[in-house]
Structure formats: C-alpha cells, structure tokens
Amino acid sequence: MPSRGEIKSEKILVKDIFSNMWFRIPEYQRPYVWGSDEIGELLDDLTFALTEKPDFEYFLGSFVFQSKVAQPEKGQEFDENDLLDGQQRMTTLLLLFAVIRDLARDPDAKDDCQKCIFQRASKYKKIPERTRLVFAIRETVQEFIESFIKNEGGTEKSDQLVKLGEKNEDISVQNMAKAVVEISKFFRNGSSPSPEGLLQFLLNKVLLIYVSTEDLEDAFRLFMILNDRGIPLRNSDILKSMNLGAMEAHAEKVKYAKMWEEAEGELGDDFDRFLSHVRTILVKDKARLNLLQEYEDKIYDPKERDVEHILPQNPKSTSQWVNDFSNDDRSEWTDKLGNLVLITRRKNSSQGRLDYHDKKKRYFEKCIDTCPNSLRVLHQNEKWTLEELKQNHESVLKRLCEHYNITSLT
C-alpha cells in the first residue's frame, strides 16, 4: 500500500490480482462498454499466447487505481482500490472466471475461479464476504453480478442472458450479458482451448502492470498519461467525482450520480460544452483555461486576488530598478494604478524584488493566469521603465473613465 503522496508501480500476475486485491468501480467511471470485438480480441490474444508461447509470460496491459485505506468512521470498513483505468479489462476477466467455473469439469478449477470472483465469509476467521469488483451507485449491475456471476451456474442461464443482452435499461448490464454469452460461445468452439487449460495459463503466466497512489489528483494525472486506448475519462468525469465526493450521504451520491449520468447520456459528446456554459453563467466571464481548471479555480476553490507592485516598493540597491528609476520617480510612481497588477496567489516578497525580466518569468507568469488585465500588461511589455509605467497608468485611467462614464479627472 503506497503512503500518502507516494506513487507505486509493479508488475503483478492475474492470480495475485484476483486473490489479494479488491476493487471499486467509482461513481465517475463510465459504464461497461466492451463488445464482441474487444472480447474476441482478448480471447484470441490469450489463446495465441497459450498455444504458441505457453512457457512465457504474457503482458495483458496496465491499470491505474487510487488506494484508499479503511475508514470505518466513514463507512469504509476495509482497504479498497478505486479503479480509474482498467475497468473494462478487469470486469471482462471477472466474467471470464465465471464462465470457466461453470464449464470446467475439474472441481479444483471451479473452486479457484470462485475464489477469484468473491471471498466466502467465515465467522470463525472473522472474514467477511466480499466480491472482487464492486460497482458503486450501479445497483442493477451489482444485482447482475449476484445473479449470474457470483453464483455457480449463473452463466449457464443462456435464455435470460440473451434477453438481457438484447434489451436492458442499464447499458453495463446489457453489455455484460452479451459478454458472458460471447465468452461461453468461444469455449464451445472446437478449436478453442479447454476452460481448465486457459485458466492455468491465465493465472500463472498472464500479468499486468499497476500504478497506484493514495492521492486522487495524482491518480487522475497518471491515468491521463498512461491511457492511450480504451475509454478515456473526460473533464466531466473528474468534475462528477469532485461533486459527488463533496456529499457525505450515500443516498445523495446515488441520487445525483444517476441524474448526472442521465444528463450525460442525453447530451452525449456535448456534455462538456454544456458544463462550460454553466460555468460561464456562474462566473459571468469567458473561459480562459481548460474546463476542469476553470471549475477548480473559479467555482470550487475561487482564489482571492491581491494587488502586487510591478516596480517593487523596496528594490535591492544592486537591482536594475535602481538604474531605471530615480528615488523621486519611485516615490511618485510606485503606488500608482499604472504600477499595480492583480495576482491570484499569495505574495512572495523575495521574488517580488526581482528585476523585471526575472520577476515576470518566475513570479508573475504563475500568478496571473486568470487575470486578463494583468496578462495584457505583462505580455505587452518586455521591459518596465518609467515610460512603460506612465503609458500603462494612462491606459488604466482611460479604462476606468470609460467604465464609470467619467468625463474629466480634474
């Protein structure tokens, strides 16, 4: 388990994933969407590796998760892993274990598959019953897992599965039902490996690489970097997570997660644009950053703005400021409007005394990204002498007069 701020990465065999790790599909994740093409490709790849290179390890891909230490006071009794990347693959492996369990003739194979799917409870060992994958807020998916995946013989209910695959309100249930039918059909093909043969190879030779951290922001960043295929998260998915994470009551999370998904389903690819319009209504200003940062900086955690002097109040005696401004100039112009800009971070007195070029690059550029007028002033001026200060002062006064309909300052 990584400590706070630590990023951990290791390769791990499938048998260790499905015996030692527990996963939660969080609220912000997309539904299960793998179809026959993706499932067929996975089964073909495993078959080829088993047939052609049975003694070599086979790399199946990577997955990213946020590790969450148990918090009984918040209703989380055990350590969990929120799966950010790898949901489609992990879910398909869970379904694959269920099908192998129901088709295998060897009792040991059946038992090993069942242990990969869920942990039986033991009151004597004080071990709770746990399913390997838990789908947060998706009760219909959990019901499907209970009926067709967890219980032995569930994947053989072909008529019910075909019916669910043809039509179901929950897209995840529909696709999972189709996947079970597809996997079952694969093993009934005369040229396919035996369920027991594929199980042995899958558990002992197939591996993945995981990347984990306890920090959600780091986990999202890792996901964005590593995910080059599959179903990428959008800004709206991360915003969904942040909104739901601010709610304490589980019932509220479920309610608003469903509302969010309904809106997302109706708007499709225009959902991010819709959220951008909402942001504009709330902020009453045009967007200048990406959607996620706009919400973080201007809605969730709006930054207080301070005023900073471009020409510092107390420049170093060896600085360029002393050469460019006389003592009288500094006395007259330091505190005038033309020498002031808005910043969005706490003042830094040490960097505030830097010469203009360094101050602009090392200080201002990090502190004015959402202040339009500050951006204009600093981007337009490669140097800051009395001439630039006076010109900006006149420009600021002119803008103020126009805004407040002032005809004369005298």
Image: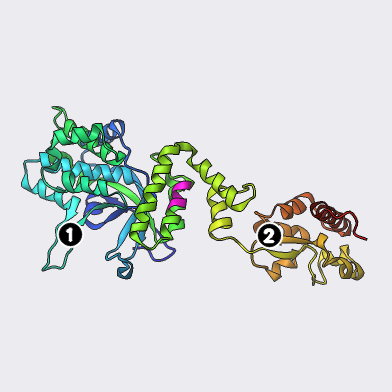
Which corner quadrant of the image does residue 22 belong to? bottom left
Mark toward the start of the polypeptide (2 vs 1): 1
Who's the residue at 20% across and 33% down the image?
163
- The residue singled out by tag 1 in the image is 129
Give the residue drawn at x 42%, y 62%: 6
Q: Which residue is mark 2?
A: 362
Q: Which kind of residue does numbered mark 2 sit on?
A: Arg
Point out the stretch of residues depicted in magenta. Answer: 236-240
Quote the CA–CA distance across marks 2 and 1. Answer: 55 Å
Instruction: Give percent across and percent down for residue 384.
Output: 82, 57
- Please state the horizontal and vertical placement of residue 111, each as a whole percent of the image: 10, 50
Determine the residue positioned at 15% across, 68% down: 126
Q: Amino acid at mark 1?
A: Glu
**Residue drawn at 37 percent across, 44 percent down:** 30
- SS under mark 1: loop
Image quarter hosting the N terminus:
bottom left
Q: Main secondary structure of the magenta part?
A: helix
Tag 2, which secondary structure?
helix
Q: Is residue 47 above or below residue 87?
A: above
Depth check, front residue: 203 or 122: 122
Q: Front-most of 168 and 36?
A: 168
How many other residues sit within 10 Å of disc 2, few (<14), some (14-19) or many (≥20)?
Answer: some
Q: Is residue 9 left or right of residue 393?
A: left
